[in-house]
Image (spheres, rainbow, N blue to C red):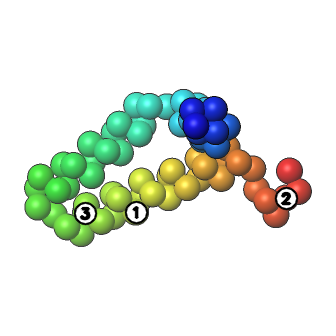
């Protein structure tokens, strides 16, 4: 099971490391701050940005299937 997880997530884990854990931490902090400030619109905006950022990291790690890589 651990080996399967490694094969599945290794490219994503590497992309996260390359992207900088500091950036990911700052993104999480921005989401938490908006929630603490009871600002649902900002929290939603921060969460959308975070999801898009993670999506980009995953796509970069896995390669673009339309490019033939």
Q: CA distance from mark 1 to mark 2?
A: 26 Å
| Residue depicted at 58% across the width and 47% down the height | 57
- Marks 3 and 2: which is nearer the front? 2
Q: Say whether residue 36 is left or right of residue 12.
A: left
Q: Residues within 10 Å of mark 2 (few under 14, many from 20)?
A: few
Could you tell me which secondary element the residue under label 2 belongs to?
loop
Q: Which residue is at the far left?
A: 37
Residue 10 spot, x, y in % from top left: 63, 35
Q: Residues within 10 Å of mark 1 (few under 14, many from 20)?
A: few
Image position of 34 with respect to 3: above or below: below
Which residue in the protein does label 2 denote?
A: 67
- Residue 9: numbered disc: none
Q: Quadrant of the N terminus?
A: top right
Query: Based on the displayed image, in which of its 4 quarters is residue 35 positioned?
Result: bottom left
Residue 45 spot, x, y in % from top left: 33, 64
In depth, the one of 55 and 8 nearer the eye is 8
**Mark closer to the chain start, 1 or 2:** 1
Could you tell me which secondary element the residue under label 1 belongs to?
helix
Which residue in the protein does label 3 denote?
A: 42
Q: Residues within 10 Å of mark 3 (few under 14, many from 20)?
A: some
Image position of 58 with respect to 21: above or below: below
Which residue in the protein does label 1 denote?
A: 48
Q: CA distance from mark 3 to mark 1?
A: 10 Å
Q: Which residue is at the far right?
A: 68
| Residue depicted at 63% across the width and 32% down the height | 3
């Amino acid at each position: 099971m651990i080996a399967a997880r490694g094969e599945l997530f290794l490219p994503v884990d590497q992309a996260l490391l390359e992207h900088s854990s500091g950036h990911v931490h700052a993104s999480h902090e921005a989401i938490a701050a908006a929630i603490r400030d009871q600002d649902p619109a900002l929290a939603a905006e921060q969460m959308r940005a975070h999801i898009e950022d993670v999506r980009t990291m995953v796509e970069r790690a896995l390669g673009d299937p339309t490019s033939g890589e």
